[in-house]
Amino acid sequence: MLALLVLAALLPSQRAAAAEHGVLALPSNVLEVPAKGHLEALYDPTGALSFEEVRAQGGRFAALPGNFNASYVPKGAWWVRLRLAPEPGANGQWWLVITAPYTDHIAVYAPDQDADGTLMRNRHKESGAMVPARERDLFTFTNVVRLQVPAGETSEIYLRLSGNRALNAQLTLWRLPELARHLTLSVLTFSLGVGAAIITSIGTLVMAAWLRAPQFGWYGAYVGAVSLVFLGNGGFGQVLLSSWDPGDVIRLQNMVGCFSVLAGAFMVRGLFRTREGARIIDALLKALGLFSALCVVASAFGYYKVVAPYLMLGILGLALVSPWLALQQVRHREPAGLWYFVGFTSYCAATIWFSLVVLGVAPLTDFLGWGYQTAGFLHMAAIFAGLASSMRAGSRARRRLESQLLALSRSNERQLEFAVAERTAALNEEVEGRRRAEDALQRALKEQRNFLVMVSHEFRTPLSTMRLAVTVMERGLGTGMSALRREVDKVGRAVTRLSNLIDTFLADEWLEHSAMMLQHRPVDMGALVADVVHDQGSQAPGRVFLGPCPQTVIEGDAVLLRTVLDNLVGNALKHTDGPVTASLAPADDGVLIEVADRGRGVPEAEREEIFERYYRSPSTVTRPGTGIGLYLARLIVEQHAGWIKVGDRSEGGSVFKVWLPRQPGLDRPTAREG
């Protein structure tokens, strides 16, 4: 709507210019004379007409209502004629400025002096984008042609315009002082505007890399590309790259122009892609960006003229869609919505106007040059302000979210502290309960142990009396009293078994409370083993045998070591009906004692458990025993820094092995299998 209002406002000026058509009068007191409304044009469809042929067809020229604007010409060339009538004092040197940024070739036939100072009515000069800037009459960013206007007559200026891009031109005649001021001001204005835009582009790209924000990156690329487009449209590319071939400069400008559309499409897509219901527009923007990328490639190979009309249609579509998307943000009260709406609305108006001019639909006016650039800079500044506003709003939202998270964290921390306190109190109460239970259990065990010790001590005296009585009875029996002797033997064996059981309980209690205060003295283990075999053999005649048993002296407690041997041999006699053999051999700087039997053996799964206190194998529950003997044996052996284990014999049965060091301080070797 804004673009239509601008165009409607410009139409009256175009009609007024049409009324002024005719020969351009050069006043003597004016330093700048625009040729708008005094131009005539002739189309050469083949492009083969010479200057003389065109001049001869002067009657075919058609008057133009304003400036020349022929848009894209598939082939051929356009001729533009300007007739000058100087007023008195207005003759002499003038400078014709031809503003035609997209015209590749401009052939000028105008009055000027040759090198000898002779006035030539139709001196031929070349200008345009394809002519190096250094070969023009004036080395500057625009097309400038020197004229020598004779006095008292009407002069004619002919321009032949051709090229692959849009053909349009604005003609203005200048006196040299005013031209110099105009060019200086233009250079200064362009330098400030484009320089600021390039600095903004670089800063935004750095910010995009730091924040990892694609929309900032596309905005930076867009601003940089548009700045270079403005630079090229103003003719500064030809000056800055004057050492290049003009065709390469134009090709580069076309590529940059296509890239600016690509960056613009993806910038708009990045700014508005989160809006619901805009998937189709998002897809169209992506398609425009990809098409622009293809246009960049086509321009690199010199096919810009082929893709340019379609690219302009895409630019028009982008200009129409962007304000609508920005308006949706305004409706949703988003912080950046108003800035985006201002920026894209100005872009829409300027782009539609520029596109219609380039396509030849709208007239070329003096306002186009600085108006389009001003709208472009306003557009870029407003979008930057929108991005900054969006970032600021995001920062506020992030701080608000951080405050909420901090409050929630503190609340959770308080709840966690309360839960931990409750759980700690519960655990303390549970620990205290367990401690009380353990104390009660310890007291009960202590009372039980004291009771057993008391009972055992109380049993020892009557058992000693009974053993003495049995001994007296055995001595008093005659040879003919065999039946009575057998009964007395049974009583003796029962008394002995009960005494051994009491001794076992007392030994367990003594080992627990004495902290194993061993009486280390030299002990002849060979003699000790032989003595135990002799004592056990007297109670089981023909079943206990002594194997190799050399004299071997170690440091140890003889009483406790005898208890170990008594328990091992007695255990073997208890669990087997066959022979039991005890032997001894030096090994690993110590002594290895073996007690072997030919019983059923010990299952492998129970070979560690049988050394635990009160453990009895399920297969031996019918046999007498307390489950303490092997436990005491291991306890005594380990207090002597030795080891004890059980294994199988190759002939069948079990073998208990005990290794004891010669001195208690020696390192204990690992128990060996077998």
Image (spheres, rainbow, N blue to C red):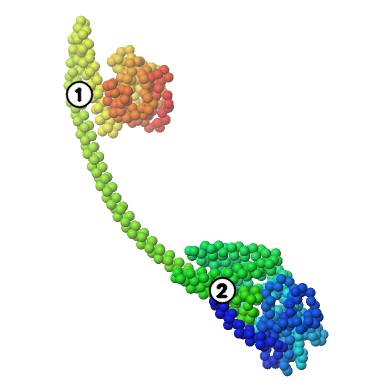
Indicate the amino acid at tag 2. Answer: Cys
In this view, the residue farthest toward the top is 480
In this view, the residue farthest toward the front is 60
Which one is earlier in the sequence, the residue at label 1 or at label 2?
Answer: 2
Q: Please give left or right for residue 40 compared with residue 579 in the image.
A: right
Q: Label 2: state its secondary structure.
A: helix
Between 130 and 492, the one lying in front of the other is 130
Work out how far the residue at label 1 is from the one at label 2, CA to CA, in angstroms: 118 Å
Indicate the amino acid at tag 1. Answer: Arg
Q: Residue at x 30, y 26 (%)?
A: 616
- Residue that carries the numbered disc 1 in the rendered image: 460
Density class for disc 2 (Cα within 10 Å; few <14, some 14-19, many ≥20) is many
Give residue 23's quadrant in the image: bottom right
Density class for disc 1 (Cα within 10 Å; few <14, some 14-19, many ≥20) is some
Q: Please give left or right for residue 605 compared with residue 425 in the image.
A: right
Q: Please give left or right for residue 217 compared with residue 139 in the image.
A: left
- Residue that carries the numbered disc 2 in the rendered image: 348
Which quarter shows the C terminus?
Answer: top left
Quick check: 9 above or below 311? Answer: below
